[in-house]
Image (spheres, coloured by chain):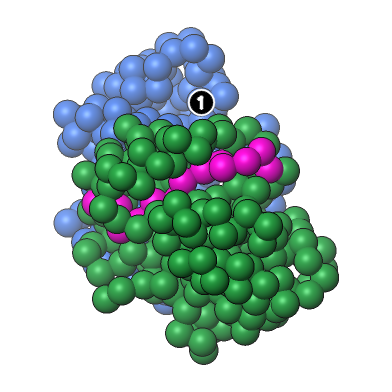
Chain colours: A blue, B green
């Protein structure tokens, strides 16, 4: 099965104030988001589980894959399409063993070495970043543009770029061969989620 | 398979200062601990995974079951004997679905209703507590002794009591029909882990 990684929303409830996350996700999907990653910390496992079930009702309705960040048990319990692990989460190879072959495995990388390792460990796609400094993840390492190019050249699996991506730089990454844009604030900090997603998609696909 | 719940160590690295957790667990097992639950928070998934692998080498060596608290993905990735969930973790029924029938499922309860629900949802054993106020878990609800007795009367699966258990009150719980004592500080705060475990075991089995 081929997946459309082009507009990949990563959630962060800190951005949406009192709005219900599932409503925000629905607007983003209506605007053109093609994949949704639920990334939540400072939440009990029970609350994460219920939130994941709610969001999955929306993603199922629109047939958009739901990916769960870090918590593979939550992913399995709600039958999510996949999981995404960072370099401080379960190792990719261990994650692959427990999710099986049918769920997507994404891995965050910020160096060529991490990218090659993740591909070898069974990743289906890579999240490469942070491309720019970002308020969403202040401790993120910045990936120089030449490292992104090297990763694009050396790995064969899809890449999404993350960290400071917005409609103003979306086209640049499309030209560099990114398969998608992973964004948090570019969509969630907008007062019009649907439009923000649509504009990002427009900027990206115009250059693909 | 029948399990021996009698001396059930729950870990908390806050108690062991700079000692290696696997060394402390080994001493506790040599003293007579029959089951070990790894309960860690404020730790990355990667560190939890490595810690679980280390501790499992010790528990495997002595053929003591290793239970992982909350993080079912960690349990699956290290092939632990079971998982333990609290009321704010994944619901017991969801946990059972993803661990299958061969791993142990423990559930923390503090009321009769929670106990009956957990049994219905597929728990193999219950952790009942907190029996007494405890520094280890300050927000824990206290279970009145009559509630423990009601749970013992109404549920058929094994019970371990937790929260403020020590060698001075161990015998009392053996008489009430508890299948085991779950302890953190009674073992981990002792300068002699092995002896603390042995004394607790002695106090418990003398009255069984």
Instruction: Give the side of residue B98 with respect to residue A199, left or right.
Output: left
Name the foreground residue: B73 vs B27.
B27
Q: Is residue A117 visible?
A: no
Question: How far from the left and from the top, in percent, is residue B164?
Answer: 65, 48
**Is A74 situated above or below B139?**
below
Side of A195 where A43 appears, left or right:
right
For image coordinates 78% across by 75% down, the residue present is B192
Badge 1 element: helix
Quadrant for the C terminus of chain A, please: top left
The answer to which quarter of the image holds residue A47 is: top left
User: Magenta region: which residues?
Assistant: B122-134
Asked if B142 appears above or below B178 in the picture, the reply is above
Q: In this view, does B19 lie above or below A64?
A: below
What is the x, y in percent for residue A16?
50, 18
Most distant residue in the bottom direction: B61
Taking depth in this image into account, of B193 and B202 the one nearest to the observer is: B202
- Is A192 on the left or on the right of B52, as rendered? left
In reply to whether residue B183 is colored magenta, the answer given is no
Q: Residue A199 is drawn in which quadrant?
A: top left
Name which residue lies at 46% across and 46% down.
Answer: B128
Main secondary structure type of the part rendered in magenta:
loop
Crowd tier of the residue under label 1, counting other residues whose Cα lies within 10 Å: few below 14, some 14–19, many 20 or above: some
**Residue B130 in magenta?**
yes
**Which chain is indicated by disc 1?**
A
Classify the position of the N terminus of chain A by image quarter: bottom left
Q: Return the residue at label 1.
A: A13
Which of these two is toward me, A202 or B111?
Answer: B111
């Amino acid at each position: 099965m081929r997946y459309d990684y082009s507009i990949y929303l990563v959630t962060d409830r800190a951005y949406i104030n009192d709005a219900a996350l599932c409503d925000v996700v629905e607007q983003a999907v209506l605007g053109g988001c093609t994949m949704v990653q639920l990334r939540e910390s400072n939440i009990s496992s029970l609350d994460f589980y219920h939130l994941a079930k709610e969001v999955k009702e929306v993603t199922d309705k629109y047939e958009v894959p739901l990916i769960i960040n870090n918590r593979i048990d939550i992913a399995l319990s709600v039958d999510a399409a996949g999981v995404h692990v960072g370099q401080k989460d379960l190792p990719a190879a261990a994650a692959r063993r427990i999710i099986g072959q049918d769920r997507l495995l994404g891995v965050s990388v910020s160096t060529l070495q991490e990218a090659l390792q993740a591909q070898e460990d069974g990743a289906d796609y890579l999240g490469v970043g942070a491309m720019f400094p970002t308020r969403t993840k202040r401790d993120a390492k910045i990936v120089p543009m030449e490292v992104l190019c090297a990763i694009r050249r050396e790995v064969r699996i899809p890449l999404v770029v993350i960290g400071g991506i917005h409609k103003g730089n979306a086209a640049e990454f499309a030209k560099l061969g990114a398969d998608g844009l992973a964004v948090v604030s570019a969509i969630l900090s907008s007062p019009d989620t649907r439009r923000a997603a649509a504009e990002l998609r427009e900027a990206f696909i115009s250059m693909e």
